[in-house]
Amino acid sequence: MKGRPLKHTFLTLAAATLLPVWASAHEFTAGALHIDHPYIAASIGAARTGAGYVAITNTGDATDTLIAVEADFPKVAVHRTEDRDGMAQMSATPRLDIPAGATVNMAPGGLHIMFMGLETPFEPGMQVPATLIFEQAGAVEVEFVVEERAAVGDTAGHGGHDMDHSGH
């Protein structure tokens, strides 16, 4: 009987340790598209922008295209960060092809979903509903989970400034 409380404590601690892994391993499916682990890097300070990331796999025989992202913010757009003459430059990507049999990974320093006009910062653990709209698969409801910046590895600095994205 003495070992039971220790065993119970161990199992409770193990479950608590693994909970963030289970919570972050979320995915969504729409037809041939598999949308894996939508997440947002936690805000830096009072940033009015935030970057979201996701992996989209197309298991079908034809290309599908992400044509819009909707969420409860003044502006949401897919952006691409590219190195131009040694400087990181962001540009809007109004159409993002997801080729048949391929995976498109949005990740820090590359493709991302920019949430603009935040009234409050993205805090770890927050859940942000959004709709990804595809040309073939249609509207797909997903939920982004805000993760600690260190866990995300976001070195691109999107959340640490308030760039003017009004031209996108």
Image (spheres, helix red, strand yellow):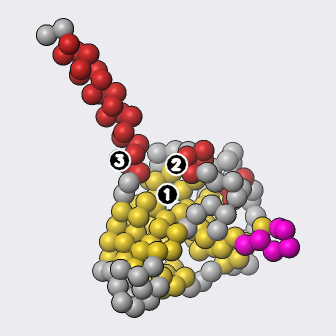
Q: Nearer the viewer, residue 56 or 76?
A: 56
Tag 3: residue type?
A: Trp
Is residue 14 magenta-colored? no
Residue 73 seen in render? no
Question: Is residue 85 covered in magenta?
Answer: yes
Q: Which mark is residue 19?
A: none
- In front: 10, or 148? 10
Q: Do the CB atoms of the residues marked 1 and 2 lie less than 8 Å apart?
A: yes
Q: Which residue is mark 1?
A: 39
Is residue 134 placed above or below 70 in the rendered structure? below
Mark sitting earlier along the chain (1/3):
3
Nearest to the eye among marks 2 and 3: give it: 3
Q: Residues within 10 Å of mark 1 (few under 14, many from 20)?
A: many
Left/right placement of residue 77 relative to residue 103 reads: right
Name the quadrant containing residue 158: bottom right
Residue neighbourhood size for the residue with mark 2, other residues' Cα within 10 Å, grouped as few (<14), some (14–19), many (≥20): many
Question: Looking at this rendering, what residue extends furthest in the right direction?
Answer: 85
Residue position for label 2? 147
CA distance for labels 1 and 2: 7 Å
Estimate the x, y position of residue 125 in percent, counting from the top left. Answer: 47, 45
**Residue under pointer 3:** 22
Identify the residue at image location x=56%, y=85%.
95
The structure residue drawn at horizontal position 46% and vertical position 74%, both measured from the top left corner, is 103
Report how far apart the C-alphas of labels 1 and 3 lie in the structure: 13 Å
Question: In which quarter of the view is residue 36 placed?
Answer: bottom left
Residue 55, visible in the rendered structure: yes
118 vs 35, left or right, is right
**Amino acid bearing label 1:** Tyr
Q: Which segment is the magenta one?
A: 82-87
Name which of mark 2 and mark 3 comes first in the sequence. Answer: 3
Taking the image as shown, residue 107 lies to the left or right of residue 133, namely right
